[in-house]
Image (tube, rainbow, N blue to C red):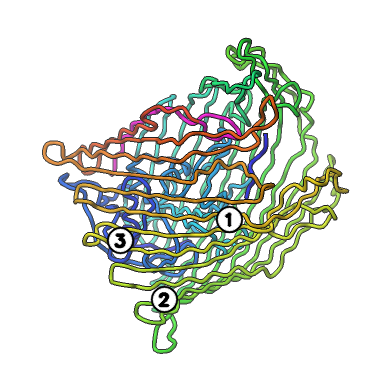
Amino acid sequence: MHAPRRHLVCALHPLAVAAFLAANLAGTASAQTTAGSPADTTETSPAGATRTDQIVEPKALDSITVSGARESASTRLQLTPRETPQSVSTVTRAQIERQSLTSIDSVLRNVNGIAVSFYDTQRPLYYARGFQITDFQTDGLPSYSSSTNQEFDTALYERIDIVRGANGIQTGVGVPSATINMIRKRPQREFAASVALTAGSWNLYRGELDINAPLNSDGSVRSRLVVAPQKKESFRDRYSEDKTALLAAVEADIGPSTVVSVGYQRQSNDPKAPIWGTIPRFATTGVPIDLPISTSFSPSWTRWERTSGTLYATLDHQLNDDWSLKAALNHTKGDTFRLSTYGYGATTSQAPFINPVTGAGTTLYASVSGGSETQDTVDAYLSGKFELGGRKHDLVVGMSSTRTATRTDGYTSVAGWSYVIPNIYTWDGNAPAPTYSKTGAWRTQITQQTGLFASARWRLADPLSVLTGLRLTDWHRHSDTYGTTGVYAGRSAIQDENRKVTPFIGAVYDITPTLSAYASYARIFNPQNYKDRNNNPLSPVIGSNAEAGLKAELFERRIQAHFAVFQTKQDNFGVRDSAITTPLPDGTLPYVAVNGTKSTGFELEFAGMATRQWRVSAGLTRAKVTRAPTDLIYANMPDYLLQLGTDYQLSGALAPLSVGGNLTWQSAIEGFNIPHPSGTVTVKQSPKAILNLRASWQFNPKVSATLAVNNVTNQKYCANLDCGNYAAPRNVSVTLRAKF
């Protein structure tokens, strides 16, 4: 089968967090809040601190009306949601806890406009506006994820911001889909602690410990420790996973104007018997074969170990009333090892097709790989206000530099290993393990990106603001090869992209105190490794996003509404040059650039407090993707995506009880070039709706229990059509949470 195409640190006031998105109410976490809007009924307090949605007197869901700006993930300007000319979503800490969202994929399933699928057990795919999301950040800096497919654990984060569309000012290199920015938990001045214990289907056991401790009497030096171990099995045969997430940080006030922090973040994932690749879709007769949902081609000795750790330091210095300086350093080291099997037919050039009577038709072939990645990032910027034309304007200027060294270790070949599964219906997973060892050779790929950026908000008139931004990026990549004795063997694949410009422009106009109109345009670029038929490297992919919309506060500002239309484009994208079959001198096949990949659509969102006791949310996205005939991607993106959510706090004798749920519906999806006994076919999956329900009981202000049921109707459907594997059936978890 084909592999999928891979296409800030900020000091927050708790009330600003609460103000940003009341839309995180129950389900979609996607409607945007505006200045003066009711909050998500949450306060992003440290562990153990009482939040406003923690029902002290369980009579109603509390609602706070506040107005506050916070640092934009795309421009780093201090903006309220009403002042942001983009589609921005936030998932708060309170929503993460309320909905038992323990991983980034469970979070993104609740964000309007984000399509989530799994290529197999360890390779999640996230798409927005027709393109894959590859830009993950932690506190505004690049996150280590590309080489490990690390599924981030939510225990370490206070909130998760999602900016849909191109984000060229901050990322430079990327795709015009969306940026995911995960904001770490930070030490607070007062002691607080919390513990959560979870048990669930398939022997799920999870713990979370969060301790915030001042280190001196006034809290000017403070610390935070977060630990989250997890063990689970699966509905899939033989699969299990151990995962641990850790965050340790110390923060100190250095005088009245300076805050410094240092910390360490680590996550390890150790899955056994992960699926790598496809589950057969067709029988030898050509008809669809409906294999049990537990089917796996992975023997118990297969694994995919992934570990990453980040040392980080930040500086926040207030120069004066108007200007501040922020700087951050990240050093990340990650390791990965994969021993896997893949199911084919009689040879690796043939797809597996199952004999419906005997269960024969699949041969396993092995693959082994491993390596490490080191990433160093430095980021610094000035932000403040200046006066021009009798008005105050906002300005941010800064620089960022990231160096990534990816090492791929050499292993002895396992190409000669194979195992014929006699009967897929009765096979117990037993197969002899291949033998392998490191050869001593390795290859290192070095990628260096350095950028200068600036963004400004121009207050041209009381109702009108114009935002401008520009990033100038130098990008370089090369590969160094070392032989089995460690001797340097040469450099190859040298690429340079210098002084690449990615602009941003936007405008916001306040039509009334509760209604604003906005528009924005941003560009992004993405270098590629392909060469054309003349052995010349292809120029970078160019992406852009244009959107316009309205943001409103309705019903006495209890409900926030957002409507946007967008057009996202990608040009110069490399696809195989089908007219040329002769390899290039380096053995690769030539590619040709295609233009015109485009996604056009709209987003409609509502969220807020229908009453003091009832949260509601709704989001509808339509994204119609058109692309060149030679550019059929393996994405499975629906044209329409609908998300509904609700939470209701009961009253009277049932006042400690709150109930809620969310429903996600998507239109039909298609998978292209799916192997079939007759050749290749297009496979369609019908529209589907997935219902999740939950209930929480507040025993007292510090102790609560939450029951969560996912896929309530127990639907059987594919997590990805092109690499056929099933999504999780109905599953249940119970979480007991206590605060001290």
Between residue 618 and residue 595, name the one nearer to us: 595
Give the main secondary structure of the magenta stretch.
strand
Q: Looking at the picture, how far across and down is residue 255, in whole percent?
A: 41, 71
Mark 2 vs mark 3: which is more N-terminal? 3
x 22%, y 51%: residue = 610
The residue singled out by tag 3 in the image is 15
Q: Residues within 10 Å of mark 3 (few under 14, many from 20)?
A: some
SS assignment at label 3: helix
Q: CA distance from mark 2 to mark 1?
A: 29 Å
- Quadrant of the rendered structure where residue 194 is? top left
Can you see residue 41? yes
- Quadrant of the rendered structure where residue 660 is? top left
Q: Looking at the picture, how far across and down is residue 734, in whole percent?
A: 33, 31
SS assignment at label 2: strand
Q: Provide the residue span drawn in magenta.
A: 718-740
In this rendering, the count of numbered labels is 3
